[in-house]
Amino acid sequence: MKTPCCIGLLSLALASLLLALPAQAARLALVIGNDSYQQVSTLKNAGNDAKLMASALRSAGFDVSDHFNLDRNRLYEAIDGFQKRLGKGDEVVFYFSGHGVQVENDPMLLPTDIQANDEKKLRREALPLLYVQDALKDARVSLLVIDACRDNPFPKQGTRTIGDTRGLRPPDVVKGQAIILSAGRNQKALDSVPGEPGQRNGLFTHEFVRVMRTPGLDVRSALVKVRDDVEDKAARVNHEQRPSLMDDMRGNFYLQASIKPEPTPDRLNPGSEGLNLNDLKKEDDNKKGWAQWQTKMKADHAQANGISDTALRAKALERFLDAYKQDNPWSSEDDTLRSKASSNLQSLRAQGQQTQNNVQPGQAFKDCADCPELVVIPAGSFEMGSNDGDDGEKPTHRVNIRSFALGKYEVTQGQWKAVMGSNPSYFSKCGDNCPVEQVSWNDIQQYIQKLNQKTDQNYRLPSEAEWEFAARAGSSTKWSFGSDQGQLGQHAWYYSNSGSNTHPVGQKQANAFGLYDMHGNVREWVQDWYHANYSGAPSDGSAWESGGEQKSRVLRSGSWGSFPAYLRSAIRDRFTPGSRNDYLGFRLARTAP
């Protein structure tokens, strides 16, 4: 007899296709709440927030270690002791509520006995967030939740304030980790929930716990919802608070543990020794569980086949087959259902391959209804850079480009909402066909990951070389249409004709490759790390992700507020990956069909 494994009930809802948890993965959490500080101001609700978080994590299936009012020695001991418990397959949450101070590029968490009177002592006495990140780096996935964005607790020392008075800044994120701060830079986290008198918790933790209790919500979706809900509720009392989110997780996990059917013991085979009444009862329970599973699989199979978009239907069937790979020992229907799904999937793949093989350079195509429309860019070579600009555009150098596909338009607000479920744009009233903006490079990576899961494609940001090759579209002049500034208004939205806002994509003339808004509307993120000049740049069109300062990502093009010189094909700039502004957007690339 075949023995079924523990299998969770998987949802094929297109917005969130669940991934199976690794077997034997431990769910561990470390919660710290500091509010009774000895030398600096005490906090109202930090301890209450930590208690609420610890309770919620325990209810969600985490093994929680919680600590309160830790001095420096005990704070480090808690981190070091927790690190010793971690394994490579574990799923980990770290939560800290208390005072935090920014010292240059380092967010610092404060123990209750902090007595620093200058930044040198502060570095010795506080706990760098990087120390925590390093302690958790061996876990499969870890989430750091930091509710420490309050006022700087240190008084001025003469004319100088210890630490940055503007709150914690988003740190660099370690591979496999995500970090959410309770407020953005220059913002203060509310210590209570608007409209709820007597509330004993801060807004951020209150909303975090409320969202994490949603069944079936993956952690990335949960974090985005927390960010949006906190911002919305703070705005109701005219307060600006938007949590900062940094994500470099690999895979995914769920804050709320899913319910799984009880495994069937090997002894349930009637020929086994030791069969007893308790085993028979378990067998009956598992028969019922598998009957429910069978019903669920039939419904999911029907749902997958009911999807109209070919690429999405194929993706749904792949997930269905992966989830339904175990045999039901009480039913013979499994093979028939799997065979139907496998046959349908093979047919869909053949249709998709035939469609892709017919796409030629210059032609546009879409992978799904909500996907950006892409144009196949032909292979070629060009002279990258310019001698007319600053040193960042030099030296000019020959680059060879392979054929690839690039967004015909900048990614729109409607396309972003279809994948992410929310709209971060400042110019949201412009409409769904306007470019999405106020998105950071890090935000875009989350969008790309979700879109790739949805379509089974490999979307990405273009390299800097690919972007300039596509923007020039065979030209070597200032702009793709030539060097006559008088024609710029026919091709771009910029400071003299935009009215200081974005406009729907595709309203101006396209360049020779059929691409719109390459010279304006919003500036566009690309994949590369910023380098001060092109000395040593790749010549094959690939993204330049080695060397350099590796602190800033490259931006190309100008925006609705740019002067003509900043719309040239060769113009380049840089921002840190977490930066957001109302003139920052992007377009997508992928391998040509």
Image (tube, rainbow, N blue to C red):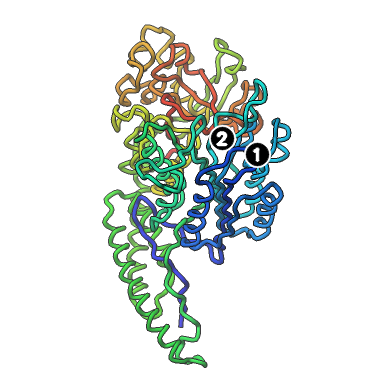
Q: CA distance from mark 2 to mark 1?
A: 21 Å
Residue type of the residue flagged with mark 2: Leu
Direction from residue 169 to residue 308 in the image, left or right: left
Residue at left offset 41%, top offset 25%: 582
Q: Label 1 neighbourhood size at 10 Å, few (<14), some (14-19), many (20+)?
A: few
Q: Position of residue 265 (x, y in %)?
A: 49, 81
Instruction: Identify the image quadrant of residue 64.
Output: bottom right
Numbered badge on residue 39: 1
| Secondary-structure class at tag 1 | loop
C-beta proximity under 8 Å, tags 2 and 1: no
Direction from residue 73 to residue 551 in the image, left or right: left
Instruction: Identify the image quadrant of residue 410.
Output: top left
Asked whether residue 451 is in view, the answer is no
Q: Is residue 294 above or below residue 170?
A: below
Q: Which residue in the protein does label 2 denote?
A: 168
Q: Position of residue 298 (x, y in %)?
A: 30, 67
Q: Is residue 136 above or below residue 183?
A: below
Q: Position of residue 385 (x, y in %)?
A: 55, 18
Residue at left offset 64%, top offset 32%: 103
Numbered badge on residue 73: none
Q: Is 70 or 566 nearer to us in this picture? A: 70
Q: Earlier in the sequence, mark 2 or mark 1?
A: 1
Quadrant that contains the C terminus: top left
| Secondary-structure class at tag 2 | loop
Instruction: Identify the image quadrant of residue 558.
Output: top left
Q: Is 255 or 459 nearer to us in this picture? A: 255
Q: Position of residue 484 (x, y in %)?
A: 41, 7
Residue type of the residue flagged with mark 1: Gln
Q: Is residue 539 above or below residue 108?
A: above
Asked whether residue 434 is in view, the answer is yes
Between marks 2 and 1 in the image, the one whose residue lies nearer the viewer: 1
